[in-house]
């Protein structure tokens, strides 16, 4: 017949095993879900950043194109007015046209520099998004029911041997030879 304390320990270990197994499974599912959320968040942020930089590139191209059109129009109007007015000094015409070209070139260079700055910022933002995903992700630890079972079995064995040792010490164990591995005598 089984000792009531040992029977309670076995029942408790079984309940703890089932509870622990369910908890490990729930934690595993929560960890995987957290990683999915972090990944989806990063994907959305990547897409948003890529859209911003594409829009910035298009805006820069459009500004450059508009600047070219404006400069060409101004040079053409100047040439027409210079030709109609009979401007005699070719040097002043050349200097004025050079000024138009210089201003257009400076503006386009400024656009290119600003775009390069925006691209550098874009690259840093992409790195930050990746780092953010890693920070939001969690270590996924799969359930380990074998370890839970082993832990429960060792707890039951501990209760059993402790109870047996107490009985032997008190002289309540009717036949200590019935056990396969008798404990050493507690009095020695």
Image: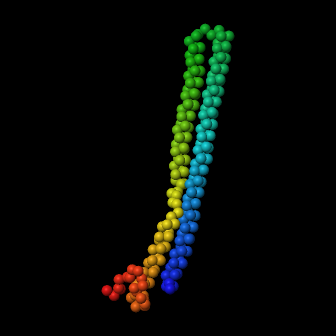
Residue, x 41% and y 80% (percent of image)? 180
Rendered view: 75 above or below 164: above
Q: Is residue 109 left or right of residue 77?
A: left
Task: Look at the picture and state if 103 lies above or below 22.
Answer: above
Q: How many marks?
A: 0
User: 183 or 151, which lies in front?
Assistant: 183
Percent across and percent down for residue 45 are 60, 46
Q: Give the percent coordinates (x, y) of residue 106.
A: 55, 26
Residue extending furthest left?
188
Identify whether 81 is placed above or below 106. Answer: above
**Of residues 12 and 40, the one drawn nearer to the viewer in this rendering:** 12
User: Coloured how?
Assistant: rainbow
Choose top left, top right, bottom left or bottom right for residue 104.
top right
Indicate the position of residue 183 as horizontal and vertical percent values. Answer: 37, 82
Q: Tell me which residue sits at (66%, 20%) in the image.
A: 73
Position of 11 relative to 129 (above/below): below
Left or right of 164 in this view: 188: left
Residue 65, x across and y down, in percent: 63, 26
User: Quadrant location of residue 172?
Assistant: bottom left
Residue at figure coordinates x 57%, y 57% from the top left: 32
Looking at the figure, which quarter contains the C terminus?
bottom left
Q: Residue at coordinates 50% horizontally, 70% vertically from top-left?
A: 149
């Amino acid at each position: 017949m089984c000792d009531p304390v040992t029977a309670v320990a076995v029942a408790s270990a079984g309940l703890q095993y089932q509870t622990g197994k369910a908890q490990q499974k729930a934690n595993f599912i929560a960890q995987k879900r957290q990683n999915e959320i972090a990944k989806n968040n990063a994907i959305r942020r990547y897409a948003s950043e890529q859209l911003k930089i594409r829009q910035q590139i298009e805006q820069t191209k459009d500004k450059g194109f508009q600047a070219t059109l404006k400069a060409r129009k101004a040079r053409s109007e100047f040439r027409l007015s210079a030709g109609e007015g009979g401007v005699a000094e070719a040097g002043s015409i050349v200097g004025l046209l050079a000024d138009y070209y210089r201003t257009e070139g400076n503006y386009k260079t400024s656009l290119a520099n600003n775009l390069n700055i925006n691209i550098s910022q874009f690259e840093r933002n992409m790195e930050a998004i990746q780092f953010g995903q890693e920070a939001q992700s969690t270590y996924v630890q799969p359930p380990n029911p074998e370890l839970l079972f082993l832990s429960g079995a060792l707890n039951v064995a501990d209760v059993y041997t402790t109870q047996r040792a107490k009985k032997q010490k008190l002289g309540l164990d009717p036949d200590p030879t019935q056990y396969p591995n008798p404990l050493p005598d507690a009095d020695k």
